[in-house]
Amino acid sequence: MSKPRQPAARPLAGTQPGLVVAGFGRHVLVETDTGERLICHPRGKKSQAVVGDRIRWLASEDEGTIEKIEERRNLFYRQDEMRTKSFAANLDQVLILIAAEPEFSESQLTRALIAAEAEGITPVIALNKSDLGEPFTRAWAKLAPYRTMGYRMLSLAIKPKVEASRPANTRATELHELVELLRGKKTLVLGPSGAGKSSLTNLLVPDARVLTAEISQALNSGKHTTTSTTLYWVDTGDGNTRATALIDSPGFQEFGLHHIAPMRLAGYMPDLRLHAQDCKFYNCTHLHEPGCGVIAEVNASDHPSSISANRYRLYTELFAELSQSRY
Ligand SMILES: Nc1nc2c(ncn2[C@@H]2O[C@H](COP(=O)(O)OP(=O)(O)O)[C@@H](O)[C@H]2O)c(=O)[nH]1
Ligand SMILES: [Mg+2]
Ligand SMILES: [Zn+2]
């Protein structure tokens, strides 16, 4: 399987520009430059537009057809043996939202980080539910290796249950940092169920519920399926109402990396990448070779290893998984 293909060029007379703001199956909701929204259908089988795509569309009765997908800056997607699932295109960053509870999976976190690195999209890790005391402290400590390897990390209390137990302005300071990080960018929010994704959208996009209801109503004409990914404009308070976007997407589970060659994995893991420079063989797999810089660091006895045992184990498991699926 290869990366989703861009469609062939078509005559563009009479078409108008638009931005894909929601996707449901093969159909999408397109926002025009003047802010109107309409449902558009793909023309032909190959052209699959995703949220974040800039397109040219042609009116047909009350809906439209997608005539062209403009070239993408990037496409964030996952892939397993069966299929490719595109999340969104033309992203500035991916916000990986996890929480003190339910406990997050380091494997899922690592997979999402690798997918972002592979597309050159900046990942940010946010740990929600900082009001939860002990579980939060534990989760924050579990993330220490990710801070060390250079990822931007935020703590958040999006919808705290026990606000009284914390200094009054902590939550405001945390949220301010988040809003500053989002300002002027298109950010895909990814995270497991229960992490607080809906709470975040509702906090930053007060009319999100109305928008979501409108979208499902527009689709409930019987011919469309449920919304999978949605782009929301965030008002960051500077009057520029269509500059900052949050993209909400399901599908953090079973994050397949089938599209990544095993030999490239270490290059997408900053902690391993740093030591892979010291390997004796240029085609080192970092699994068993003599003179391997990664293995030397994992086994370091004269200093605390900068590659955690968990990360190295995830690397070997992923390497095996990605090797198995190609012969
Ligand atoms: N204690 C605490 N609970 C939160 C916080 N943010 C969200 N929650 C709760 O976590 C649960 C899951 O939130 P939701 O936004 O539905 O998560 P989603 O599945 O990622 O969309 C809800 O019960 C929220 O009220 C927080 O900062 N602290
Ligand atoms: Mg939700
Ligand atoms: Zn090596």
Image (cartoon, helix red, strand yellow):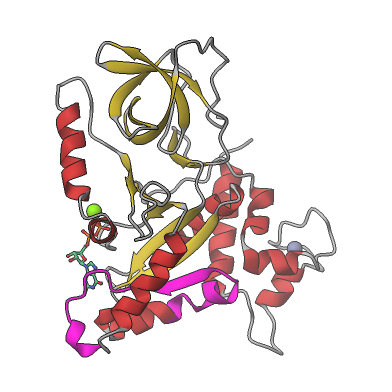
Residue 256 shown left or right of residue 239 in the figure: right
How far across and how far down the image is residue 149, in percent? 60, 72
Query: Can residue 155 be found in the magenta stretch?
Result: yes
Q: Does residue 98 sit above or below 67 in this rendering?
A: below
Which stretch did the figure color magenta? 141-166
- Res. 152 visible in picture: yes
Q: Is residue 108 visible?
A: no
Q: Is residue 104 magenta?
A: no
Compared to residue 60, the image places residue 245 above or below, namely: below
Nearest the viewer among 192 and 65 is 65
Where is residue 40 shown, x and y percent of the image?
A: 33, 22
Residue for point 39% across, 48% down:
254
Tell which of 173 and 281 is nearer to you.
173
Residue placed at 58% from the left, 40% from the top? 73
Q: Depth check: 121 or 86 in front?
A: 121
Indicate the quadrant where residue 65 lies: top left
Question: Residue 162: x and y, percent?
Answer: 17, 82
- What residue is drawn where x is 64% and y is 44%? 261
The quarter of the rendered structure image containing the C terminus is top right
